[in-house]
Image (tube, helix red, strand yellow):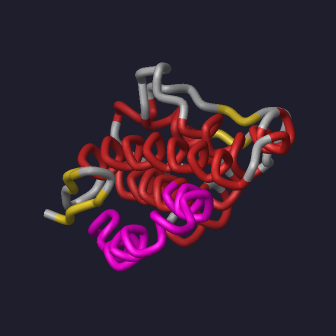
C-alpha cells in the first residue's frame, strides 16, 4: 500500500481552489490528512511503536491492540471506520503539540464563524479563511512528508508535489 498516492490529484485541485475558496480548501486538506493518517495506521498497525500506545476509545472499547491482528478488510470495518481524525493523530503522533483535529473541528463546526466572523464583512472573513488555509497546508506538509510515500514543498501557499 502506497500511502497518500491517490490524493495527489486532490492536492493539485487545492492549488486551483484555494485562492477563491480558502474555507473549502481547508476542509479538503483535513480530509486528506485524516486519510493519510488512517492509511498509515492500516499499513503499520502491527508495528510495536503504534501498539505501545494503548489507545482505547471508551466506552465502546475500540482498541488498536484488540484489532491490529484482524485481516485488513475487517480491521478497516471494525476499527478504522470508527475512529476520528483526533483518534488517528493520538495513535500516530507522539508529539501532543500537533492538534489537527481541533483546527479541523473549528472549521467544520463553524466555531470561528459563529463566535467571531459573523460580525465581519466578507473581505475580512475571506482573510481569516486564507489564514486557516495557510495553517491547514502547514499541517498537510508535515503529515505528507512524514507519513506518506511522496513529499511536498510549500511555496507561497502553493503545494508543489515532489
Q: Is residue 98 above or below residue 136?
A: above
Our reading of the magenta stretch's main secondary structure is: helix
Q: Give the total of numbered labels.
A: 0
The segment highlighted magenta reads 1-29
For the residue pair 47 and 1, the one nearer the viewer reads as 1
Q: Residue at x 64, y 52 (%)?
A: 123
Inspect this view and state whether residue 67 appears: yes
Inspect this view and state whether residue 70 appears: no
Q: Residue at x 47, y 64 (%)?
A: 18
Q: Quadrant of residue 66?
A: top right
* Percent of width and height locating residue 160: 21, 62
* Percent of width and height locating residue 39: 43, 59
Q: Residue at x 63, y 45 (%)?
A: 104
* Percent of width and height locating residue 51: 45, 34
Q: Does the magenta-highlighted stretch encompass residue 17?
A: yes
Q: Residue at x 84, y 34 (%)?
A: 115
- Quadrant where the N terminus sits is bottom left
Q: Does the magenta-highlighted stretch encompass residue 80?
A: no
- Quadrant where the C terminus sits is bottom left
For the residue pair 91 and 4, the one nearer the viewer reads as 4
Q: Is 89 left, or right, of 11 in this rendering?
A: right
* Percent of width and height locating residue 71: 50, 66
Q: Is 162 left, or right, of 146 in this rendering?
A: left
For the residue pair 8 and 61, the one nearer the viewer reads as 8
Amino acid at each position: 500500500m502506497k500511502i497518500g498516492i491517490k490524493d495527489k490529484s486532490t492536492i493539485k485541485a487545492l492549488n486551483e481552489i484555494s485562492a477563491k475558496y480558502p474555507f473549502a480548501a481547508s476542509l479538503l486538506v483535513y480530509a486528506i490528512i485524516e486519510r493519510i493518517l488512517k492509511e498509515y495506521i492500516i499499513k503499520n498497525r502491527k508495528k510495536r511503536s503504534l501498539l505501545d500506545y494503548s489507545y482505547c476509545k471508551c466506552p465502546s472499547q475500540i482498541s488498536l491492540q484488540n484489532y491490529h491482528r484482524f485481516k485488513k478488510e475487517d480491521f478497516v470495518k471494525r476499527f478504522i471506520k470508527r475512529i476520528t481524525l483526533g483518534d488517528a493523530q493520538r495513535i500516530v503522533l507522539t508529539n501532543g503539540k500537533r492538534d489537527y483535529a481541533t483546527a479541523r473541528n473549528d472549521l467544520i463546526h463553524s466555531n470561528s464563524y459563529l463566535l467571531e466572523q459573523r460580525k465581519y464583512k466578507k473581505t475580512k472573513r475571506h482573510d481569516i479563511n486564507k489564514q486557516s488555509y495557510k495553517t491547514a497546508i502547514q499541517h498537510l506538509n508535515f503529515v505528507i512528508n512524514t507519513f506518506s510515500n511522496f513529499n511536498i514543498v510549500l511555496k507561497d501557499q502553493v503545494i508543489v508535489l515532489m
